[in-house]
Amino acid sequence: MGNRLSKIYTRTGDDGTTGLGDGSRVAKDSARVASYGTVDELNSVIGVVLAEEIPAAVRETLTQVQHDLFDLGGELCIPGMAMIHAADIDRLETTLDGFNADLPALKDFILPGGGTAAAHCHVARTVCRRAEREVVALARVETVRPEAVRYLNRLSDLLFVIARVLARASGHGEVLWQHERRKK
């Protein structure tokens, strides 16, 4: 592949604009930049989860997700590009079903926590939801393929299930919301 970035700073963004993958320039606070920036943030938070001791199956899944998110960021950075497909969403669903099969049915709401890895995964889930909202906002003003929204929607569900798996694997267990504490 060679050296793509031999110089990190270009000064071209000093005027408050940034270059998209197609060569066009947009404001750094545009909906498009916000959407792929939040996808990048999500990828970074997943990297924090991966820095923890986690089960191999979770590590493999989250590493694949990081690659997908890099592709999704590219798709959002290059208008008209298609890098996330139905098969990627199907893979998330199959993986989610597999992890969820061994978990007890939910009877209560779960609070973020359950050990460091699980707590970081809950942060990833909330950043994923924000990324989804940002992509939906972008889709109101520019063309965005529906697969982008579907992928993020499914990923947030998967991250919730993985947080449950990680809480149990760590021995901390899930932190359940105690709704009855308010009844007196």
Image (tube, grey):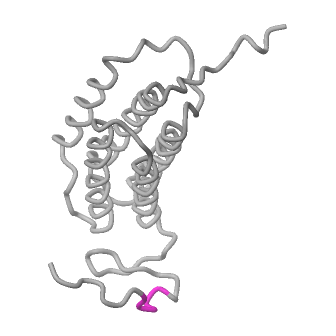
The magenta segment is 9-13
- Name the quadrant containing residue 156: top left
Majority SS type along the magenta span: loop
What residue occupies the far top of the structure in this picture? 184
Q: Is residue 146 above or below residue 32?
A: above
User: Count of labels shown?
Assistant: 0
- Name the quadrant containing residue 151: top left
Where is residue 77? Give x, y as percent.
32, 67
Is 22 situated left or right of 17 in this image? left
- 129 or 163: nearer the eye? 163
**Is residue 11 in the magenta section?**
yes
Residue drawn at x 48%, y 31% is 170
Q: Is residue 56 above or below residue 83?
A: above
Q: Is residue 117 above or below residue 134?
A: above
Where is residue 12? Give x, y as percent.
43, 90
Residue drawn at x 85%, y 7% is 184
Is 181 situated left or right of 68 in this image? right
Quarter of the figure with the N terminus: bottom left
Residue drawn at x 36%, y 44% is 152
- 149 or 70: nearer the eye? 70
**Is residue 80 in the magenta section?**
no
Residue drawn at x 29%, y 49% is 63
Where is residue 138? Give x, y as percent.
41, 57
Q: Is residue 38 above or below residue 146?
A: below
Where is residue 148? Give x, y as percent.
30, 49
